[in-house]
């Protein structure tokens, strides 16, 4: 079903009828959908609200202060509109930069997504790890701390894949197989030349291209993400809340601004969700 322009008033009406617990998920675009899809498929009862901050996209090319301001405003909007029990920041950049500030400001629990450096280090035989992430994430102090804590004995080769984020958000649903392979080829060529044996997908948008990464990297290079690890952490946190009132579930997608064409309808159909249109955030 084609999404319509929703308003906060309709969200307020929906809030009163939502099953509990309610999980609200924020990303700058479609990147976090594989996380919520995994959670919804594993535990379909409850309410799952996904906000793609298309007005603020992309986060990865912005500075820290700007990211914190934008993400705080989006979380406030979700909190006022749906009164969720738990938040998932399904964006590596937003989690790396803003998660601490969010936990200080809001009393509700948060789960974040950060580059899977620890499991990559556990799996790497050659101690050479590739990390592809946004421009902000690859240079952040948080990422540096992850590497020094969990991969101090590894060489971590970094690739800033900001253009790939834009490709996934704006072109993926219209791209053929050849275009998808070409989109990931620069990163894959870099990692193969650097002789890594493990690659971390450090931005959630890249999860939509896992097949292409695995194809070009070949069977000798492992591709690591945090979907299942983060998903299980969310499920554990949801156990703190009462069981849903009914056996049904809600998986709704909103955007923070108008989007061109049927892109979000296409993604909603792909993941068994509904695109509900715009959530107006002041």
Image (tube, rainbow, N blue to C red):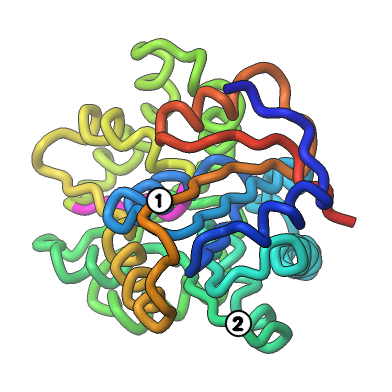
**Quick check: is 201 in the magenta stretch?**
yes
The residue under the point 21% across, 53% down is 198
20 displayed left or right of 218: right
Q: Is residue 45 above or below residue 162?
A: below
Camera-nearest residue between 156 and 41: 41
Tell me the element at label 2: loop
Q: Is residue 137 visible?
A: no
Q: Is residue 182 left or right of residue 72?
A: left
Q: Is residue 137 above or below residue 181?
A: below
Residue drawn at the location 53% of the way across and 76% of the way down: 110
The disc at residue 248 is 1
Q: Crowdedness of circle 2 by 10 Å Cα count: few (<14), some, many (20+)? A: some
Residue 82 located left or right of residue 137: right
Between label 1 and label 2, give the one nearer the viewer: 1
User: Which quadrant of the structure image shows residue 188?
Assistant: top left
* As drawn, 170 above or below 157: above
- Gap in angstroms between the C-alphas marked 1 and 2: 24 Å
From the viewer's side, name the closer residue of 3 and 58.
3
Mark identifier at residue 108: 2
Residue drawn where x is 56% and y is 44% of the image: 252
As drawn, 142 above or below 195: below
Q: Secondary structure at mark 1?
A: loop
The x and y percentages for residue 23 are 52, 64
């Amino acid at each position: 079903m084609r999404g319509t322009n929703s308003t906060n008033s309709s969200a307020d009406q929906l809030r009163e009828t939502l099953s509990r617990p309610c999980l609200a998920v924020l990303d700058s675009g479609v990147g976090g959908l594989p996380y919520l899809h995994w959670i919804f498929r594993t535990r379909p009862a409850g309410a799952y609200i996904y906000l793609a901050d298309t007005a603020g996209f992309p986060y990865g090319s912005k500075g820290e202060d700007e990211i914190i301001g934008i993400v705080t405003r989006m979380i406030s909007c979700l909190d006022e509109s749906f009164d969720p029990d738990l938040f998932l920041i399904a964006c590596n950049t937003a989690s790396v930069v803003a998660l601490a500030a969010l936990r200080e400001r809001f009393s509700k629990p948060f789960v974040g997504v950060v580059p899977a450096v620890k499991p990559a280090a556990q799996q790497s035989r050659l101690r050479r790890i590739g990390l592809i992430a946004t421009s902000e994430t690859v240079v952040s102090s948080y990422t540096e701390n992850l590497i020094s804590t969990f991969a101090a004995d590894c060489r971590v080769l970094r690739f800033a894949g900001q253009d790939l984020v834009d490709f996934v958000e704006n072109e993926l649903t219209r791209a053929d197989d050849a275009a998808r392979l070409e989109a990931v080829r620069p990163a894959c060529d870099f990692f193969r030349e650097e002789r890594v044996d493990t690659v971390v997908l450090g931005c959630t948008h890249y999860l939509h291209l896992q097949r292409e990464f695995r194809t070009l990297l070949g069977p000798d290079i492992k591709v690591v993400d945090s979907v299942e690890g983060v998903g299980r952490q969310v499920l554990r946190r949801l156990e703190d809340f009462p069981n849903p009132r009914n056996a049904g579930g809600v998986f709704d997608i909103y955007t923070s601004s108008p989007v061109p064409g049927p892109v979000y309808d296409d993604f909603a159909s792909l993941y068994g969700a509904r695109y509900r249109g715009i959530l107006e955030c002041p």
